Image (spheres, rainbow, N blue to C red):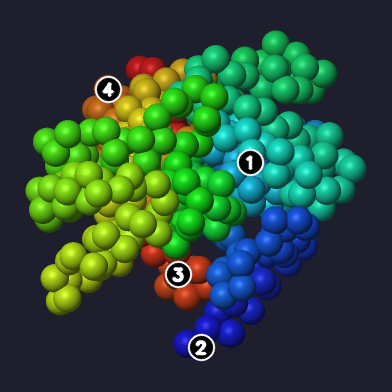
Amino acid sequence: MRPNIIKRGMFNFLKAHNVEHVLAEPKEVKPKEGHEIHFPVHLETTIKLIKQNLFPEGTKPDSVKSFLDCTLGTGGHSKTLLQTFPNLYVLGIDLDKRMIDYVNQNTKQTLKEEEIKRFAAQNHNFTQINKLSPVMAFPDEFHRREKFDCFLADLGYNSIQLEGEEWGLAYNSNNLLDMRYDKETMKLSAADLLNTSPIYELEEIFSKFGEEPAANFISKLIVKERKKKKIETAQELKDILFNNMNPRTDKYKVLMRIFQALRITINAELQNLETFMENSFDPLKENGIGMIITFHSLERQIVVNHLKELKKKQKVKILELNLPPSDQEITLNRKSKSAHLHCFKKISPN
């Protein structure tokens, strides 16, 4: 099937759900030439799951529901859900204050006045999900209601972060190799880590969090090169790797794994995910649903293990586990290829 037909199919789906702007470019921060705009992944599945579980046929017209977007990013999922479900109130949180600013200055401006009333964006770490409630954001609508009907945690970083040089996530950036989502609480940048860690620590980081087969060689190489000059930018790290790796090696895959390892370490991503999964059950109402989108095996293992344990205790019904994106979505958005969706429903105790 040709890509233009598939893209037209996705636009028709969004149009059918009264979503007009989700695929439009942001107003101010635009992708660099040659780069794709940010597409929210598993969007169609997310809408279907919410419709089936929160707004099934026969739901009272005035029945309001609450949704927590645990990783707001540019607001793609939240915006679409606000436009699709007129009785859904959305609280979006993000650890990165820059993303909250982005949503308030860009995404929010494309919402209708009625949709803005049902939306709130706040700066929180998603590990604090057990301290959040609908009444915090919408006291008039939810009164004493302390639990959410639904939450979504999309664990991928977005195109704005990837292309924005201040984050230090882009491979070709000449800015500081930073990678921190929150500079106020995270004192160590990726450049600091590369320039101060001993060989054995670097090897463990690259092996454990990047699953890099050449972790030992790369660790020794970095220590050798940093003695000549501090490694300060993404471009410098890329050059070191590309100039010293075997020509037959897929260098971009190595670079991707090293960047993943650094990002996970700097932001304590896996520790935070463990905490989030431990805290994510109680904030849901009975029959409420939780959705998590993972992007690599380390994340998937944590999420799947937690869900299987909850199922064993008869606390949840698993609705989806390791659901890959459709061929249509991958053609529209190649970055979605590794995105796997997991969904569970909180059930009544026996």
Q: Nearer the viewer, mark 1 or mark 3?
A: 1
The disc, 4 or 1, on the residue closer to the chain's N-terminal end is 1
In the picture of the structure, the residue carrying the numbered disc 2 is 2
User: Residue 144, relative to residue 128: is it above or below?
Assistant: above
Q: Nearer the viewer, residue 348 or 99?
A: 99
Looking at the rendered structure, the secondary structure element under dot 1 is helix
| Residue found at x 50% / y 68% | 333
* Residue drawn at 83 percent across, 48 percent down: 109
Of tags 3 and 4, the one toward the viewer is 3
Separation of residues labelled 1 and 3 (CA atoms)? 23 Å
> Is 309 on the left-hand or right-hand side of 181?
left
- 69 versus 323 height, above or below: above
Distance from Cα at disc 1 to Cα at disc 2: 34 Å
Please tell me which residue lies in front, 49 or 270: 270
Q: Which amino acid type is marked by label 2?
A: Arg
SS for dot 2: loop
Asked whether the viewer can see residue 111, the reply is no
Tell me what residue is drawn at x 53 percent, y 83 percent.
Answer: 3
| CB contact under 8 Å: marks 3 and 4 | no
Q: CA distance from mark 2 to mark 4?
A: 46 Å
Read off the residue under disc 3. Answer: 334
Q: Which residue is mark 1?
A: 99
Mark 4, other Cα within 10 Å: few <14 / some 14–19 / many ≥20: few
Kindly tell me whether residue 247 is visible in this rendering. Answer: yes
Looking at the rendered structure, the kind of residue marked 3 is Arg
The residue under label 4 is 313
Which image quadrant: the C terminus?
top left
| Residue depth check, mark 1 versus mark 2: number of the one nearer the observer | 1
